[in-house]
Every structure is written in C-alpha cells, then in structure tokens.
Amino acid sequence: MLPDVQFINRPQLIDMTWGHPDPALLPAEAMQQAATTALADGGATALPYGAEQGPGRLIELLCAKMARAEGSAPDPLRVAITGGISQAIDHLCTLLTRPGDIALVEAPTYHLAMRIMVDRGLRLIPVAADDEGVRLDALEETLAMLAARGERPTLLYTIPTFSNPAGATMGLKRRIALTELALAHHFTILEDDAYRDIWFENPPPPTIAALNQEAPVVRLGSFAKCLAPGLRLGWIVAPPAIIEAWRLSGLLDSGGGVNHFTACVVAELLATGELDRLGERLRSAYRIRRDTLVSALQEHLPPGASVASIAGGFFAWVKAPEGIDTVALLPRAEAAGLGYIPGARFFAGGGGNQYLRLSFSRVTLEQLRAGAQLLGKLFV
Ligand SMILES: Cc1ncc(COP(=O)(O)O)c(C=O)c1O
C-alpha cells in the first residue's frame, strides 16, 4: 500500500533522525473547529481560488501576531502566504535566480534546503559557521574570493535562529552586519526562521528582515513546527519588489494564492488565540525533552564528546570524541538501536564527520534517556 505520511516507522530503533513535530502535539480538534468556522459562509471565502498574496485576513492576523510576539510587525504589503519554507525557497529560486548562480550556505546548514537549491541548478558554496551561525570573517573572505574570479553570490541562505542542525543563534550585531554586507554586495539573504516560536528560556533576537527595511532580506516563516507540517503553509516577509514578483508570477496567476483553504483555516486559529496557546504548550513540551536529553547526554557522553547548547528548536548537535567518524559509526548505531543523522550531511563542502544530529522532537522521554546512554556506549 502507498504511504499516507512521510515518517517511516522503524520500531526497532530509538529514531532521532526526524525533525518532525510529535504527532501527539498536533491540534486536530482545534483544526476541525477552525475548518468548520472557515466554511460557515458556505465556503464562499475558503473554497474559491485565493488572492495571490494570500488571504488578507490571514496576513493581517499574522502581522498582529508578529507585533505581539516580536514587538514589531511588517507592513502587510511586505507579507505573502507560502506553501511553507520549502515551497518558498523553491519559488524564490524561480523568481530570483538562474541555474548556475551561486548560493552561499552556512556550514553546517539544513541539508534539505540545500537539495531544493541544487534542484534549481544553483552552485552551493559553504561558509564556515560558529556558535552564532555564519562567520562574518569567513563570509567576507568568500565574497573577496568570488570577486577575484569576477563572480558574486545571488543568495545567502541562513538559519540565524535555533539553527538546524547546530542550534546556533546569531546575535544582534552580526545580524545587522549581515544586512550591510547584503546591501554592499548585492545578494539576497534568505532568512530561514522555522524555529522562532520554539524557544526555551528567552524569545530570540529580532529577525534579520526586521532590522533593516532597505536590505534585500526575505524572512521565511512556517506553520510547520508551531502548528502542523501537513498544512504546508508559511509566509514570507520581503521587500515590496519581491512580494510584487511573487504575486505576479505565473504560478500564482494560474492557481491563485498557495494553499488557500488551509490559509483560511489557519486564520481562524489565529483569530481565536489558539495558535498563541499552542505555542505555550509546545514550548513547555519540547523544553522538557531538551532538558531530559541534555542531562542524559551530560551523564553518558565520554570525555572528548560534547553537545552544543540548545536554546530553542528541535536538535542536539553532538561532537564525537576525536577519531570517531559518525558516518562510519551509523550502521553500528542502528544495529544497537539508535538512529541519528551524521554531521557530514549538513556540510556543502564536505567535513563534519565528527558531528551528528539528534532530534528530540518526536521521541519519548524514556527514549531520550536510553538514546543518550546508547550513544555514550557507542562513543567508547
Ligand atoms: C530549518 C528548516 N527550514 C525549513 C524546514 C521545512 O519547512 P516547511 O515544512 O515549512 O517547508 C525545516 C524542517 O525540518 C527546517 O528544519
């Protein structure tokens, strides 16, 4: 039988490969009510082709949510509804790039975003990152190296907030400096903001897009992690020219706004405050998992191994002791009952073999404890 969902159940494993929300935390009942309300006018709003930019009601409610959560909101004219971050990256590649163009990516970065850009014929160039994400000195070096060859990047793809896989968050100074570099070197920053709502102690710094209205920055937002990934719904905040290009593109002209029915349902969840309440529940549920995993790792990892600090998001970025290659270790780990993603998958230019990513979002507390113990044994 053909599958209905992407997740593949491997019951023999404590499977910490999937960066998916826990199905038990998906708000099915609230969604059902919201769908009923969205259809209360007989489907007159939710069932026709939608406005190209997305339903105005959702955009306005979303701007109000950003104002509540972030202290400022973009002009609604700078917002468009998307089919989630993956679809937005793909369509922005259509609008902003040509095959052969260069996209700079952090090393490490979200492996599947790299796949989308490679599908679009982009050449990926890695830029070294530290515990604040992309390093400015490495970026400037790369820009100079490209300029010497008569080239420049079209895009810089970055996850400055609770990054996947490293959990890194960029400070304010570096965010501002990035906007200045983008302006000076004429590249567009794709700011992947997938995990903003999943913070554990303090809300994160402002988005790069909010810091400089003149800079070419597209913030990529998603309802995948803070609501449900099957919705395939998100939004962009972008300079007016990019919103205009999005709105007028053939894809939107032909099909109307992306996932219009879903967008109308999500507007109801925002209007009733359900999305804010869900955010609270998710933060406390994932915080407990983070705490459980980190303390188990601290207990079981041998000397020479470490885990990066995790202030938000779904991932623990683990460094293995010297001499351990996490690609080579994986078959042994799976045979012992643990699934992880080797660090090498997240590096565009190779490397990362001493690292691995554990996702704590979709496993139980018992599994987190047992998984950390298994990893500790595999490392010695
Ligand atoms: C950093 C990052 N960006 C984007 C996505 C996918 O977003 P969406 O479901 O909105 O396409 C993920 C999912 O794992 C992610 O980790």
Image (cartoon, grey):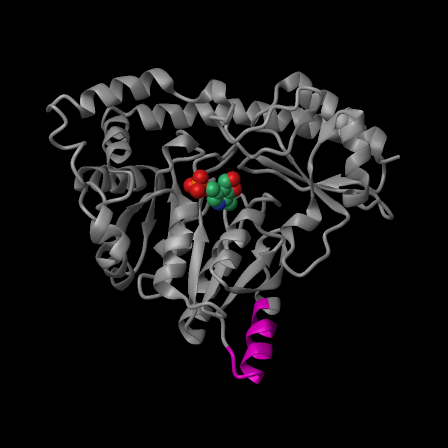
Quarter of the figure with the C terminus: top right
Percent position of residue 124, x then y: 56, 63
Q: Is residue 315 above or below residue 255?
A: above
- Magenta part of the protein: which range? 139-151
Residue for point 50% across, 26% down: 3
Percent position of residue 278, x then y: 38, 24
Viewed as shown, does residue 35 lie left or right of 89? Answer: left
Q: How many marks?
A: 0
Furthest toward the front, the residue is: 1
Percent position of residue 75, x then y: 22, 52
Can you see residue 296? Answer: yes
The secondary structure that most of the magenta stretch takes on is helix
Residue for point 41% across, 55% down: 208
Viewed as shown, does residue 229 lie left or right of 288? Answer: left
**Magenta segment: does it hold 320?**
no
Quarter of the view holding residue 10: top right
Residue for point 43% across, 69% down: 187
Q: Is residue 80 above or below residue 315?
A: below
Percent position of residue 44, x then y: 11, 30
Can you see residue 301? Answer: no
Quarter of the view holding residue 145: bottom right
Quarter of the view holding residue 78: bottom left
Q: Is residue 120 above or below residue 29?
A: below
